[in-house]
Image: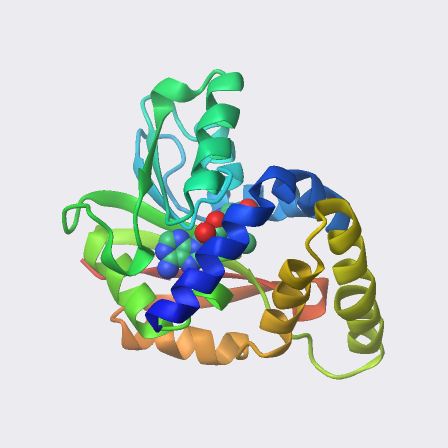
Amino acid sequence: MSAPHDTLVRNLFDRIAWRYDLLNRIISFRLDSRWRRKAIRALGVAGRPALVLDLGTGTGALALDACKLLAPGSRVVGLDFSRSMLMHAKDRTSRAGHAARAAYILAHALAAPVRSESFDAVMSAFVLRNVGDLGSFFRESYRVLKPGGRMVSLDMFPPPQGVFSRLYWFYFGRLMPWIGGVVSGDPAAYRYLSDSVRAFVSPEKVADTIASAGFVDTRTVRYLRGAICLQVATRPR
Ligand SMILES: C[S@@+](CC[C@H](N)C(=O)[O-])C[C@H]1O[C@@H](n2cnc3c(N)ncnc32)[C@H](O)[C@@H]1O
């Protein structure tokens, strides 16, 4: 994606970082942590120490859950280009007593400053809509994964047309930006988040892009009638 788009996204997350965790819990009725735990279980590294990369780690919600749920000896690297989001991630991880298991890097997800084939698993949550160039995102995920490693992505998608979708858009298109605006003082940021879901592609299109990056065994698990999807794929050996 273009540099102006990256700057817009980075500035937005820098601005809302201080309220991000609280608003996530309010807006998702705390369901977000349940989906994150499912994403971690899908990494396929249970019972053995693993090195895991979290692209677009934000305030470290997924990275921290991984520190708690993965086998002893596992390590998590969280990467993000928003300095403020990372500051919260580091603070939150130390407060939870997991500083020794996690490291955070300030970097662009499409140019991760890490060696090729060095991670047992790569994960991301609610990042795809901000990245723009999905092909590059999945090619970069593929590059850093060891052969046989899994890539897991959790994200929001426009739900299929129907009664649920009308209710969803009333909530996510109208109420959520209003609540987000009141709590964070930044209505434009929460309008962007809602608009970015409305304009996003289908899970099928994302699955095709994942496969084009070289992954195999791509599967999509749908929650909330497809408004949330967990996508899992493997780098072949
Ligand atoms: C919606 S937040 C999700 C944070 C976290 N994964 C979670 O589950 O709460 C999206 C995060 O992705 C980061 N991000 C978006 N595009 C990025 C890019 N190209 N490189 C690095 N980080 C990026 C943003 O700065 C933001 O912290």
164 sits to left or right of 1: right
- Which residue is pictured at 65% across the width and 69% down the height? 226
Q: Nearer the viewer, residue 219 or 181?
A: 181
Examine the image and state in which quarter residue 48 appears.
top left
Query: Which quarter of the figure is the C terminus placed in?
Result: bottom left
Position in image of residue 36 (x %, y %): 56, 45
Examine the image and state in which quarter residue 171 appears.
bottom right
Position in image of residue 111 (x %, y %): 23, 57
The answer to whether residue 45 shows anywhere in this view is yes
Q: Nearer the viewer, residue 200 or 41?
A: 200
- Which residue is pictured at 51% across the width and 33% down the height? 88
Task: Point out the residue furthest to the bottom here.
Answer: 161
Q: Is residue 63 above or below residue 177?
A: above
Query: Which quarter of the figure is the N terminus placed in?
Result: bottom left
Position in image of residue 139 (x %, y %): 26, 66
Q: Is residue 215 above or below residue 56?
A: below
226 sits to left or right of 79: right
Position in image of residue 55 (x %, y %): 38, 50
